[in-house]
Amino acid sequence: MASKKVESVKVAVRCRPMSEKEIVDGRACIVQVDAKRGELIVANPKPDTSEPPRQFTYDNTYGQDSAQEQIYCDTAYPIVQSVLEGYNGTIFAYGQTGTGKTFTMEGKEEPQENRGIIPRAFEQIFYGVDQHPQTQFLIRASFLEIYNEDVHDLLSKSSKNKLDIKESPDSGFYVKDLTTCVVKGIEDMKAVMDLGKGNRHVGETLMNRDSSRSHSIFTITIESSESDNTGINHYKVGKLNLVDLAGSERQSKTGSTGDRLKEATNINKSLLTLGNVISALVDGASTHIPYRDSKLTKLLQDSLGGNTKTVMIANIGPADWNYDETLSTLRYANRAKNIQNKPKINEDPKDAMLRELQDEIARLRAQLGDG
Ligand code: ADP
Ligand code: MG
């Protein structure tokens, strides 16, 4: 039996490069990163205050010239490896809109080195599968979006449909009727990703949604079975959540009114609850953790104070005009460092689909043999 060790949420902070506009506008760079020490210093750009520079330390920090590959190796690689071994893992990107959450999670297809965490995870998973020819794998993917506290299935054509979140005594919260696709290789996985991105785009256009206000969760479930020397099969199931959160900026900055404000309020509800869950877990003063207060925290319950290996990548911009938001993100990330999880391998789950499929094949074989 695997031992249940306490493990803190890992927190990395990534500062994107100055944008062209920031350079043209002559904005000052206020963020300095010492990647070797995992440190980051933010200078105070406000001439009218005497606030000193702030220093922060995280598991990893990345400056403006950081490489996607480096970030993958440090943050995602160990998690994906654990998921192949039957652990649950979550990687989520937090930060203000425009700071590089989607660049970090998805990246760009060209040039190759700009591939983000999600396509690299696909590659690692199928490489891992190829390395274990004696093991049988069943890999499935689902892709959803939380917008306005409604859950939308990004793999179903009618992405307007709102799905319900249910609770099971064994596996906690789950999305009822969510499409899951069996994937046999990198190309399948990319096709699933593209389908979801396409549906998300259609939803944005038809429903006038703003993607920076929605949370997306791409989930990969890896079931594996290996037979021991007595011929008995042992099953494991690992689940990987790849989460691109809505922009964390305060609403005053975007000047929302009317419908947009309602949206913002709801989306803030998920992000706000995420913050409340983190506080409750970290302060330890209360035994009540408000997971049930939002869709996002219900679905990520296991990743925060549960049985999951979790990495948070907080994204920030380097320019002076983002000072307040940057500090707010850095403080948020600082608190998240103190969340403790107890990851364990999910062995022989009752509902392993691979077991059902293998039993079915055995039944059919027996019938053929009988006939
Ligand atoms: P977010 O998803 O947080 O709103 P994006 O990922 O869309 O932000 O990034 C905003 C812009 O900045 C995009 O044009 C993106 O390509 C660019 N960008 C973000 N991070 C980086 C980076 N580390 N290197 C190069 N370009 C980046
Ligand atoms: Mg984005």
Image: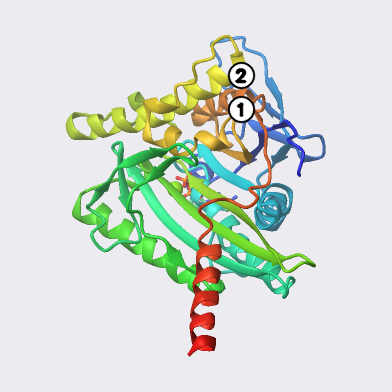
Query: Circle 1 sits on which residue?
Result: 336
Residue 228, compared with residue 143, is above or below; it is below
Q: Amino acid under label 2?
A: Val
- Marks 2 & 1, CB-CB < 8 Å contact: yes
Q: Earlier in the sequence, mark 2 or mark 1?
A: 2
Q: Amino acid under label 1?
A: Ala
Q: CA distance from mark 2 to mark 1?
A: 8 Å
Query: Where, by quadrant of the figure, is residue 131 drawn?
Result: bottom right
What's the colour scheme? rainbow
Residue 315 seen in render? yes
Query: Where, by quadrant of the figure, is residue 231 drawn?
Result: bottom right
Indicate the position of residue 276 as horizontal and vertical percent values.
Answer: 48, 20
> Does the closest atom of ligand 1 sit within 8 Å of the Cβ of label 1?
no
Indicate the position of residue 114 as horizontal and vertical percent values.
Answer: 60, 62
Q: Nearer the viewer, residue 12 or 349?
A: 349
Q: Which mark is residue 282?
A: 2
Residue at x 31%, y 49% (from the top left corner): 152
Indicate the position of residue 228 as horizontal and vertical percent values.
Answer: 76, 65
Residue at x 43%, y 25% (from the top left corner): 273
Q: Nearer the viewer, residue 94 or 37?
A: 94
Residue found at the very far front of the displayed protein: 370
Secondary element at image label 2: helix
Query: In the image, 94: left or right of 124?
Result: left
Secondary element at image label 1: helix
Indicate the position of residue 287 as horizontal and vertical percent values.
Answer: 54, 14
